[in-house]
Image: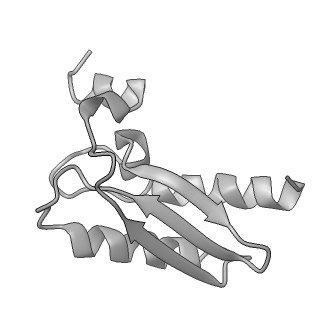
Amino acid sequence: MSETTTTLRDQIEGVLRTVYDPEIPVNIYDLGLVYEIKIGDRGEVKVTMTLTAPACPAAGEIIHDVQQKVEALEGVIDCHVQLTFDPPWTKDMMSEEAKLELGFL
């Protein structure tokens, strides 16, 4: 993996930490909602993610926020957000910080 890709990955992870589910005061990255980040050679990014619940009322807003913030990064030409519910999200996928912040530890 080139240094540029690593830096871009870090930047993508950084902006994903600024996207929040409006109902939960923890970002989607630390909640464990982001399953995969793929970066293509030309700067195309694919983010595979889930939601805390399939009927999440903020789904469109969250996906739009992810796409807009990732595409705003230098070196990214396009961001495609793939929504999946396989595997279903569980509280076990949260980072230790997120569990602590939400009182699960």
Q: Residue furthest bottom?
A: 77
Please tell me which residue is depicted at 54% across the width and 71% down the height of the picture. 70
Please tell me which residue is depicted at 77% across the width and 80% down the height of the picture. 42
Above or below — where is 48 with respect to 40?
Answer: above
Q: Residue furthest top?
A: 105
Q: Residue furthest front?
A: 86
Query: x, y percentage for residue 41?
Result: 79, 74
Q: Is residue 1 left or right of residue 18?
A: right
Q: Is residue 5 left or right of residue 79?
A: right
Query: x, y percentage for residue 10?
Result: 67, 52
Give the mark count: 0
Query: x, y percentage for residue 61?
Result: 26, 74
Above or below — where is 74 with respect to 3?
Answer: below
Q: Residue furthest right?
A: 2
Please tell me which residue is depicted at 26% across the width and 15% down the height of the picture. 105
Q: Is residue 5 left or right of residue 100?
A: right
State the residue in front, 86 or 78.
86
Above or below — where is 87 with respect to 60?
Answer: above
State the residue in front, 82 or 20.
82
Please tell me which residue is depicted at 46% across the width and 61% down the height of the picture. 48
